[in-house]
Image: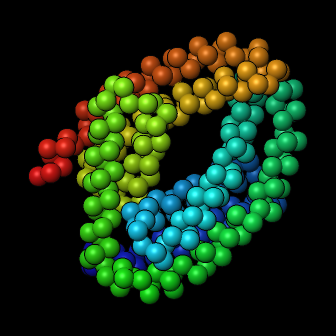
Amino acid sequence: MEQGMFLDKYVAEIQNLTAVLRDAYRRLDENTDDEALHDLRIAVRRIRSLLGPLGSLPENQALREAAAEVGRLTTPTRDLEVLIAELDQRGYSALADGRRKLLQAEYREIVQAPELQRLFAELKQWPAAFARSDLGGDSPELKRIIGKALNRQVRKLYAGVTDAEFDRHKLRILVKRTRYITDAFPSLSPLPAVATTSLKKAQSALGGWHDHYQWCLRGQQEVDLEPLVKGWSKAQKEELKAAEAALKKLANTLPSEHAMNK
């Protein structure tokens, strides 16, 4: 890939994700399908992954903050969506239906939230601001900084998965961030293909464990969920075992610190 093409593709990818985000927002506003919020969050997450390696660039700061705010805003509602789906799957339709009214209310709050309007405004002005930045016309330096950030992220992941005492909640976030930044810049990633596959499996396993952990906590606070807590607790332990096995496989595929320094 020619040097200038990398920079152009970087800007174009964020603009493409902006279009995806706007479409998901429209679907959420019109309440046309159950995947709108999920798709909106994925678009925001991918935008954050593209911006993350350039965290020190002043022209990116406002957009990074706006995207992070939308992530925080939408997380509780996404958690509620996942819980409702679990209740439906387990046959607790009445419990699921009782939470759908709350879910619809939260959808309306998100659609009307100033955080989303701020994000759209920042996305609109970002291309021009980035073009004026130190990196806006320097494709080789852009690639160098992003490549360095990817190596740094993989080093953090390697340290986490090879440490048996590393907090699994923090490790779940680390696995997610590494996967997203790797997906954003596959050509610059130091990970071999087998590691990328293991990364996805580890994220899925940790996600299943985390869901059950969260549901157990909710079951302690929401009385009508109490009948499910015992089953969730058992599943949580099983999911953690599966996650540990996935993490072990992931550790065996990651480049070591020594290999990264070559």
Question: Residue 143: horizontal and vertical position, in percent?
Answer: 29, 70
The residue under the point 29% across, 31% down is 162
**Quadrant where the N terminus lies?**
bottom left
The residue under the point 43% across, 65% down is 55
Question: Looking at the image, how many numbered discs can be counted on the residues?
Answer: 0
Q: Is residue 241 left or right of residue 95?
A: left
Question: Residue 113: horizontal and vertical position, in percent?
Answer: 77, 62
Relative to 241, residue 56 above or below: below
Q: Is residue 96 left or right of residue 38?
A: right
Question: Residue 123: horizontal and vertical position, in percent?
Answer: 59, 74
Relative to 206, residue 137 above or below: below
Colour mapping:
rainbow
The residue under the point 46% across, 59% down is 49
Relative to 218, residue 71 above or below: below
Can residue 188 be seen from the camera position used here? no
Q: Where on the picture, by quarter, is residue 231?
A: top right
Q: Where on the picture, by quarter, is residue 184?
A: bottom left
Q: Is residue 51 left or right of residue 85?
A: left
Question: Residue 213: horizontal and vertical position, in percent?
Answer: 60, 26
Q: Is residue 154 left or right of residue 117?
A: left
Q: Where on the picture, by quarter, is residue 10?
A: bottom left
Can residue 117 be seen from the camera position used here? yes
Q: Nearer the viewer, residue 226 or 196?
A: 226
The residue under the point 64% across, 69% down is 119
Q: Nearer the viewer, residue 186 or 135?
A: 135
